[in-house]
Image (tube, rainbow, N blue to C red):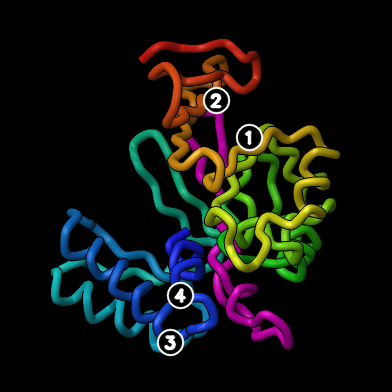
Amino acid sequence: LVRDIFDEALPGNDDRLLTFLVLGLIAILEEIPVGTLWLGAGRDENGLFRRMRDAARKADVRVSVLRPGDIVSWRDARLTVLHSGGRARKSDTVNNQSLVAVFEREGRSALLTGDAGAPTERDLEARGRLVQADLLKVGHHGSRTSTTPYLLAAVQPRVALLSCGRENRFGHPAPSVLANLAAYGVRVFRTDRLSDVRVELAQNRDDPLGIALPVGPHSLVDVVTGKRQLH
């Protein structure tokens, strides 16, 4: 999302874009309490990971590299890493080394795909690592290189979150991705149209999956039944 914002402000200047991206992430470490900085096991593009490590060290923040099979647990939730790093592909190497993980909380789950593209999706499906999830974070801001029909068939999400900048120069989200999501009956929430979107995973299987939007009544919408829950 941060990259989309600066792509709009600084079109065609990747060096300036990277500088602003790094400064934004470093500001988070400096201004917001952070317990641990998680990094993927992929290639360090333009020294971004190194700069993040340096910033974390100065802020006394622990750094952890997540690898496939790693599990991070909390009292009522866990994060399982499905993909991170791996072999360098001939095309889109960095994006296809993205960290892919599933977050679970007492009966509900969300698949977080990073910028992973179709080759990674195919590999996860072939290895039987794709799991059904209530919510899908759409890969690579809705790029046509991600969110393939076989991913959707395996995951069967009810809801998709799509993070992209308004009128971004890449044309995200791609019409083909929106068509794939529509074909599988997935309800899509887009940041370019809705700004912030908050998701609440239910505490048990009988509770709804809630989506809170920045407009309208302060409530959660059960995307399964359409009922509102006031908060």
User: In whole angstroms, how far apart are the C-alphas of marks 3 and 2?
Assistant: 40 Å
Q: Secondary structure at mark 1?
A: loop
Looking at the image, residue 155 sits to the left or right of residue 52; the answer is right
Q: Nearer the viewer, mark 4 or mark 1?
A: 4
* Mark closest to the chain's N terminus, 1 or 2: 1
Write down the residue under mark 3: 15
Image quarter of residue 27: bottom left
Question: What type is the residue that disc 4 sits on?
Answer: Leu
User: x, y percentage for residue 1?
Assistant: 48, 58
Give yes or no for residue 95 being in the magenta stretch. yes
The segment highlighted magenta reads 82-110
Labelled pair 1, 2 in contact (Cβ < 8 Å): yes
90 lies above or below 208: below
Question: What type is the residue that disc 2 sits on?
Answer: Leu
Write down the residue under mark 1: 134
Question: What type is the residue that disc 1 sits on?
Answer: Asp
User: x, y percentage for residue 14?
Assistant: 48, 83
Give yes or no for residue 44 being in the magenta stretch. no
207 lies above or below 125: above
Write down the residue under mark 4: 10
Q: Nearer the viewer, mark 2 or mark 4?
A: 4
Labelled pair 3, 1 in contact (Cβ < 8 Å): no
Labelled pair 3, 4 in contact (Cβ < 8 Å): no
User: x, y percentage for residue 116?
Assistant: 64, 66
User: In whole angstroms, how far apart are the C-alphas of marks 4 and 1?
Assistant: 36 Å
